[in-house]
Image: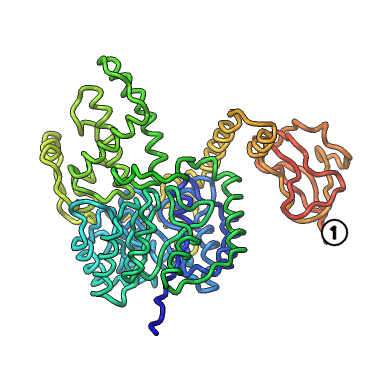
């Protein structure tokens, strides 16, 4: 009897959040979820960081290096492989990086406990991937070279298999099929997997897909039938929609087909599910677009990643009034939102081949969408297409990020010539000189530590703007202001009394007991313990001000600060009452 072929699973915990909203969980939340993910017993790998992960840590005033080390440590200890998303020439950001910074990345991430780097180029230009393969190997990481999957006349099995051959020859022991928009056709993906595995039987193939347009369960089955080794999955409450297939459904489908797949500890699944929902309720949910919970077949027509739908709809609404104002001036009827959305999808279909069929993945998906949206606006103004393009859009078209898969349309070539723009045919790396000496010098002048394994130097050079805001405290202040605005918006909606109470709590910071013990109120530091603090409702506190005491179970007296400051709006614990660790003592509204 032939042994069943084994399929492993990777939980894309980072991408689960990125596909739904703006932020990632905090370090303390990641530390809480990691042991539960391990307890689920079904994951060989977990995605622990990568593009957009570390920027958002900085944006709410948290050190991303500490977060990465804390999140990877439990997985390292039990032998679960950790992996990150790496944008090749762009590394962890949206624009190109110099060589010395890219090379430092792999040393830093290996030291922090990241095992595998998933290296992709949005243009599938091997010149942007191969140097990273070399640097990752030198640093002790496993480089997983990536094929960005899309659906066009150019992106054939032969096109992709030729790129895979080059990446494997350069030393990549693994290939990822990155179906970032979920529009990869199951038949093509199955054939591509078979071609790569037949020619390179020892190469590990991992398949990553989004569920937005509804094809990916069929695609998962096809790639597994043809030799794929590892499947990326998600879990509730952030599975399906514009995200990824749920581990339960994928495991069931493959198990019943006859593959050897691990069992799921469902008690741990439910625990992880509840924790993730808790993180969403805490603050992450305020920055999630509800539409990202829904799948949409409309994505098949435009080929855009589902995770873009939220930002795309916001952009569309922003341009809609201007477009309709211009149409009304011309005596034309205004578009409805649905009509304009279809117009935008059609315009993406027009623009995409004319700018050389770049795979619609970050940042090129944003560029193509932006060109299409600007075209709709200029059309309403009576101006020609492509007359409102910024330097980033032109950079893609001119070859400064790599070679486009297809040819640029003659009309755009003529426009470039008219604007005295030159097409670049050299290696993109040559355009970005080394930078670390400059950043190292500034850190020394500022008295900033370079960090363990130069990780702070790396973070500053990689995310300069966000790092400066993190260091001076303005990032945290801006995040708190944005969060307050999001909470106020939620509060303004019509809700029931029960919902209003829940939103009241959501609109305030909880003062939480750090340990179990007895609550001792002491107002204004005057030494007098009072039986009721209701008269003090409305009292204003600054961040870190003394709030109350807790006498813990060992007889120690702990001073409890007033969270981030603000107005005391509710008391949740009684004088002399016993509280458990994590119990809410009061709510303070900023």
Residue drawn 84% across the image and 47% down it: 520
What is the x, y in percent for residue 525? 81, 40
Left or right, 15 with reference to 400: right
Name the residue furthest bottom.
Answer: 1
Of helix, strand and loop, which one carries label 1? loop
What is the x, y in percent for residue 542? 68, 37
Left or right, 386 with reference to 92: left
Is 579 above or below relative to 168? above
Using the image as rendered, state which of residue 564 and residue 316 is in the foreground.
Answer: 316
Residue drawn 50% across the image and 55% down it: 64
Q: Quadrant of the N terminus?
A: bottom left
Count residues near mark 1 (Cα–Cα under 10 Å), then give few for <14, some for 14-19, many for 20+. Answer: few
Q: Quadrant of the C terminus?
A: top right
Is 216 above or below relative to 193? above
Using the image as rendered, state which of residue 316 and residue 55 is in the foreground.
Answer: 316
What is the x, y in percent for residue 77? 55, 72
Q: Which residue is mark 1?
A: 555
Residue drawn 15% across the image and 45% down it: 408
């Amino acid at each position: 009897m032939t042994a069943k072929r084994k399929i492993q699973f990777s939980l894309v915990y980072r991408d689960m959040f990125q596909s739904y909203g703006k932020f990632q969980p905090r370090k303390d939340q990641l530390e809480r979820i990691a042991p539960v993910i391990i307890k689920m017993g079904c994951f060989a790998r977990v995605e622990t960081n990568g593009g957009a992960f570390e920027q958002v840590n900085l944006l709410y005033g948290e050190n991303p290096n500490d977060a990465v080390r804390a999140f990877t440590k439990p997985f390292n200890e039990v032998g679960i492989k950790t992996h990150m998303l790496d944008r090749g020439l762009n590394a962890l950001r949206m624009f190109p990086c110099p060589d010395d910074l890219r090379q430092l990345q792999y040393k830093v991430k290996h030291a922090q406990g990241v095992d595998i780097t998933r290296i992709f180029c949005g243009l599938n230009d091997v010149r942007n991937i191969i140097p990273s393969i070399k640097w990752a190997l030198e640093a002790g990481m496993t480089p997983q070279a990536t094929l960005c999957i899309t659906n066009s006349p150019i992106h054939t099995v032969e096109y992709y298999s030729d790129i895979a051959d080059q990446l494997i020859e350069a030393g990549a022991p693994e290939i990822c099929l990155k179906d970032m928009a979920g529009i990869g056709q199951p038949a093509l993906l199955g054939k591509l997997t078979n071609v790569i595995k037949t020619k390179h039987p020892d190469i590990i193939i991992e398949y990553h897909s989004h569920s937005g347009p509804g094809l990916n369960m069929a695609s998962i089955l096809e790639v597994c039938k043809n030799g794929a080794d590892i499947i990326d999955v998600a879990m509730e409450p952030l599975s399906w929609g514009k995200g990824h297939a749920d581990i339960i459904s994928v495991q069931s489908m493959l198990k019943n087909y006859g593959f050897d797949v691990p069992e799921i500890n469902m008690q741990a699944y439910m625990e992880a599910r509840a924790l993730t929902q808790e993180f969403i309720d805490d603050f992450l949910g305020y920055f999630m677009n509800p539409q990202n919970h829904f799948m949409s077949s409309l994505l098949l027509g435009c080929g855009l990643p589902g995770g873009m739908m939220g930002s795309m709809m916001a952009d569309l609404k922003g341009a809609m009034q201007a477009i309709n104002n211009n149409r009304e001036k011309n005596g034309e009827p205004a578009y409805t939102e649905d009509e304009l959305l279809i117009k935008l999808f059609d315009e993406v279909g027009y623009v995409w081949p004319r700018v050389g069929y770049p795979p619609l993945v970050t940042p090129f998906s944003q560029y193509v969408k932006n060109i299409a949206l600007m075209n709709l606006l200029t059309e309403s103004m009576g101006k020609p297409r492509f007359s409102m393009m910024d330097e980033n859009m032109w950079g893609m078209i001119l070859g400064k990020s790599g070679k486009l898969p297809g040819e640029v349309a003659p009309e755009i070539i003529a426009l470039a010539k008219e604007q005295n723009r030159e097409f670049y045919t050299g290696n993109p790396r040559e355009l970005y000189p080394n930078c670390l000496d400059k950043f190292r010098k500034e850190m020394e002048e500022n008295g900033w530590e370079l960090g363990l394994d130069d990780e702070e130097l790396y973070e500053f050079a990689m995310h300069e703007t966000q790092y400066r805001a993190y260091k001076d405290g303005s990032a945290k202040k801006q995040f708190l202001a944005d969060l307050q605005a999001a909470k106020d918006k939620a509060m303004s909606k019509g809700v029931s009394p029960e919902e209003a109470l829940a939103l009241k709590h959501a609109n305030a910071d909880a003062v939480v007991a750090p340990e179990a013990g007895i609550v001792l109120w002491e107002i204004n530091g005057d030494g007098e313990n009072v039986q009721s603090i209701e008269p003090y409702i409305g009292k204003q506190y600054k961040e870190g001000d003394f709030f109350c005491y807790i006498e813990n179970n060992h007889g120690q007296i702990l001073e409890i600060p007033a969270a981030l400051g603000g107005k005391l709006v509710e008391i949740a614990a009684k004088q002399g009452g016993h509280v458990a660790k994590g119990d809410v003592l009061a709510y303070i509204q900023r």
